[in-house]
């Protein structure tokens, strides 16, 4: 039975995706789960896996095309099956293509100019460059993608780097202490697609969502000691991070406050049945959120393993649709960067986001005696259209209760 | 400085060393009364006598075998092989005996042996007498392989190897005998196992030895007219191979063409290229090119023979490829 592969929806607000590349050609065989195509969304480049095995009967869209979510992109048939495309998808392949072509420029996906598109596409491809050109680019902090190559087949060679250095004085000194001796010239760096997407989302969030913020401080000695105990028993590759505990604690607190695990849709608030915690991951090219599903239900160890795997994929630029789709609440943790506390912008359409500062050893007055304790400041940002300060504060109390009695996290 | 031919330079080196050390003696086919097929030892027989300039039967294995024994017994033989192609008849004596005697006898013997052999094609001597199989001998640890590309180096290196205590194959390219160059009047020695810059340059490194040294120098002159400043490095010895100046040059130019008269496969170019990629990978700016003999038994026909041998134009073309 032929299967229709559709453009997946990789986020609440994803309207379309760009089909970058087919990885399996028409009439080639394909296994279930094999990567069929690569799709670029505002967030990332993701792989689309075949929902069934068989033969790729037809690509319904061309490479480099923007395709609305849910629209058929390919048909996978059994090896000797004859396929009636029209019957299968209610229209002919030609119509699909024509529709996709007609809609592409008009979609809200902030189409890139061809130049931008080129610049965006390039990072995925390996630049042909000689070893010395690579080394010089590294030493001088140049992006090989931006340097035209004059060598055989467009290879970037030493001469091209020297030419680039001559026109970008900022980069003219190798990295290192010497670079500080001279003032650095200004430079213009085009926004990456991810950077652009972050900008649009954050601007929209900050301009349209009435934020408010509530900060609290939680004691983490018990948590850190529990973590140390557990990690003693776990193999190196399975060690738990502080963030894993925080994600779990946030999920448990959300179970008590379904209103904070929600989204505003028109005139109603949708309280999500599942608790999927988005975890902000800082990447070289920008910020991405991976999604720990059913974080309230999953045991801590499984949750940690999942998060580790997804973060790994994110860093390699290999996230899968499920990795980034469907978060209902976000945790953003800058604890590792020695920050006191910070305030996060909401990740639409979520109702709240939790910002985590560093755990610091501070003096605490207990029964008239100053004792050292490790404490951590956390700030909840919330959507005032959905909730109010009192509820946010109560949520923080619930979160604090779990963190300070961390055995709860193991139940 | 005197300007003399390669032939004279080699002849002078032999003469001076025979005068200096009475343990030095020459043996080979037609080296005595006839004065050598390439006239290198003309006049030696009359001056040094038949005891020190010995004509041998046409039996290369016997020539090198006798030289091996003499060297083990403390003499300093200089055996001449009329062409390196005949070295194959003496292969066992060269690679199984000479190259290994000292090691296999646990250092009880030195082997102060020099085998002079005439290499190279281009004189219409047919496929079996025109080979440039130098690299074969450089494959064997225990045997030094020296192959100069200028009269100056030929004289200085030959004197060094005669004085040394190692078995050495000293390769003279037949077409270089008439090549003239400056040679000091006073005595001098050239170090074994040291590559030399024959022409400094900035843009591309030409690595050469023996016959391809003058070819590369001519190519460099032609390229200079196009504004390309080539540096020519002469390996001078194939074993031990001194990569120092080659790597240093390549770190500057980032581009190289390796030239040799022998065949390309498994050749000097292959070895030097591999070592450059190993030792200077981060300095590579273009694939390294090799110029060598076409992979055919060398034709007798003059036009075909010249087409098969590497020429100045091939080197220039290769430089254009890497620039």
Image (cartoon, coloured by chain):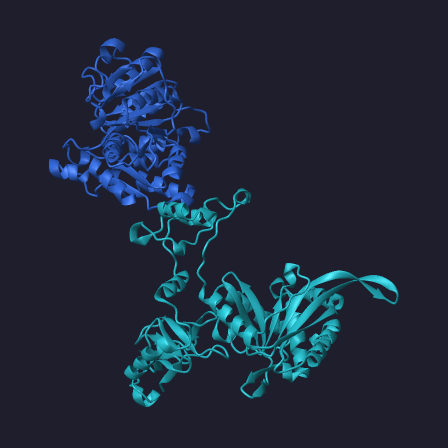
Say which quarter of the image contains residue B103: top left
Return the x and y of residue A40 as percentages of the image width and height.
42, 71
Q: Nearer the viewer, residue B313 or B166?
A: B313
Q: Nearer the viewer, residue B72 or A307?
A: A307
Say which quarter of the image contains residue A270: bottom right
The N terminus of chain B sits in image quarter: top left
Return the x and y of residue A410 as percentages of the image width and height.
70, 75
Residue at 38 percent across and 35 percent down: it is: B249
Residue at 64 percent across and 84 percent down: it is: A258
Chain shown in blue: B
Residue sitting farthest toward the right: A368
Say which quarter of the image contains residue A110: bottom left
Left or right: residue A8 compared with residue B178: right
Return the x and y of residue A29 as percentages of the image width and height.
34, 75
Task: For chain A, give the colour.
Answer: cyan
Q: How many marks?
A: 0
Q: Answer yes or no: is residue B82 visible.
A: no
Left or right: residue B210 compared with residue A158: left
The C terminus of chain B sits in image quarter: top left
Check the image and report above or below for A6 versus A117.
below
Q: Answer yes or no: is residue B191 visible.
A: yes
Residue sitting farthest toward the front: A207
Residue at 23 percent across and 41 percent down: it is: B317
Return the x and y of residue A398 as percentages of the image width and height.
72, 78
């Amino acid at each position: 039975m032929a299967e229709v592969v559709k453009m997946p929806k990789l986020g609440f607000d994803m309207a379309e995706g760009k089909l970058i590349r087919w990885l399996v050609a028409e009439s080639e065989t394909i296994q279930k789960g094999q990567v069929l195509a690569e799709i670029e969304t505002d967030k990332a480049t993701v792989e689309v896996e075949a929902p069934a095995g068989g033969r790729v009967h037809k690509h319904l869209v061309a490479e480099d095309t923007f395709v609305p979510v849910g629209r058929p992109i390919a048909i996978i048939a059994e090896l000797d099956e004859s396929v009636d495309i029209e019957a299968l998808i209610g229209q002919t392949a030609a119509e699909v293509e024509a529709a996709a072509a007609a809609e592409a420029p008009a979609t809200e996906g902030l189409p890139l100019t061809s130049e931008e598109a080129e610049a965006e596409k390039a990072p995925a491809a390996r630049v042909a460059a000689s070893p010395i050109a690579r080394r010089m680019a590294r030493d001088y902090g140049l992006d090989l993608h931006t340097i035209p190559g004059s060598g055989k087949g467009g290879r970037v060679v030493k001469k091209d780097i020297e030419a680039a250095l001559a026109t970008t004085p900022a980069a003219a000194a190798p990295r290192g202490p010497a670079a500080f001796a001279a003032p650095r010239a200004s430079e213009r760096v085009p926004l990456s697609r991810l950077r652009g997407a972050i900008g649009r989302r954050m601007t929209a969030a900050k301009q349209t969502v009435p934020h408010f913020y509530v900060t609290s401080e939680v004691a983490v000695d018990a948590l850190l000691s529990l973590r140390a105990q557990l990690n003693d028993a776990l193999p190196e590759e399975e060690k738990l991070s502080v963030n894993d505990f925080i994600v779990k604690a946030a999920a448990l607190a959300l179970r008590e406050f379904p209103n904070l695990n929600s989204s505003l849709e028109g005139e109603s608030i949708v309280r999500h049945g599942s608790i999927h915690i988005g975890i902000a991951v800082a990447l070289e090219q920008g910020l991405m959120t991976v999604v720990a599903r059913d974080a309230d239900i999953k045991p801590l160890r499984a949750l940690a393993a999942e998060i580790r795997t997804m973060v790994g994929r994110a860093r390699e630029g290999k996230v899968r649709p499920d990795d980034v789709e469907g978060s209902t609440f976000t945790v953003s943790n800058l604890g590792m960067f020695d920050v006191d506390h910070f305030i996060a912008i909401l990740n639409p359409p979520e109702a709240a986001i939790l910002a985590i500062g560093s755990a610091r050893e501070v003096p605490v007055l207990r029964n008239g005696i100053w004792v050292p304790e490790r404490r951590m400041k956390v700030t909840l940002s919330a959507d005032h259209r959905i909730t109010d300060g009192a509820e946010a504060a109560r949520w923080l109390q619930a979160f604090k209760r779990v963190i300070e009695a961390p055995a709860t996290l193991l139940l | 400085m005197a300007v003399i031919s390669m032939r004279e330079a080699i002849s002078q080196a032999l003469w001076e060393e025979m005068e200096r050390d009475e343990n030095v003696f020459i043996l080979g086919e037609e080296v005595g009364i006839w004065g050598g097929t390439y006239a290198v030892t003309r006049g030696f027989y009359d001056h040094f006598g038949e005891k020190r300039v010995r004509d041998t039967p046409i039996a290369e294995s016997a020539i090198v075998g006798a030289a091996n024994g003499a060297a083990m017994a403390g003499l300093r033989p200089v055996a001449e092989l009329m062409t390196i192609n005949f070295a194959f008849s003496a292969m066992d004596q060269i690679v199984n005996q000479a190259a290994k005697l000292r090691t296999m006898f646990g250092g009880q013997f030195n082997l102060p042996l020099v085998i002079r052999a005439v290499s190279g094609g281009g004189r219409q001597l047919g496929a079996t007498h025109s080979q440039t199989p130098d690299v074969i001998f450089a494959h064997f640890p225990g045997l030094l392989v020296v192959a100069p590309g200028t009269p100056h180096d030929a004289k200085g290196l030959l004197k060094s190897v005669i004085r040394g205590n190692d078995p050495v194959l000293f390769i003279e390219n037949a077409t270089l005998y008439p090549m003239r160059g400056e040679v000091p009047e006073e005595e001098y020695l050239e170090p074994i196992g040291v590559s030399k810059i024959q022409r400094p340059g900035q843009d591309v490194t030409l690595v050469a030895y023996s016959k391809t040294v003058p070819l590369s120098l001519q190519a460099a002159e032609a390229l200079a007219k196009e504004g390309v400043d080539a540096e020519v490095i002469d390996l001078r010895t194939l074993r031990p191979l001194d990569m120092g100046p080659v790597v240093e040059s390549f770190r500057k130019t980032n581009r190289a063409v390796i030239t040799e008269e022998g065949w390309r496969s498994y050749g000097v170019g292959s070895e030097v290229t591999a070592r450059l990629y190993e030792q200077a990978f981060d300095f590579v700016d273009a694939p390294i090119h090799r110029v060598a003999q076409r992979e055919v038994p060398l034709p007798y026909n003059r036009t075909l023979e010249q087409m098969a041998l590497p020429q100045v134009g091939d080197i220039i073309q290769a430089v254009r490829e890497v620039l």
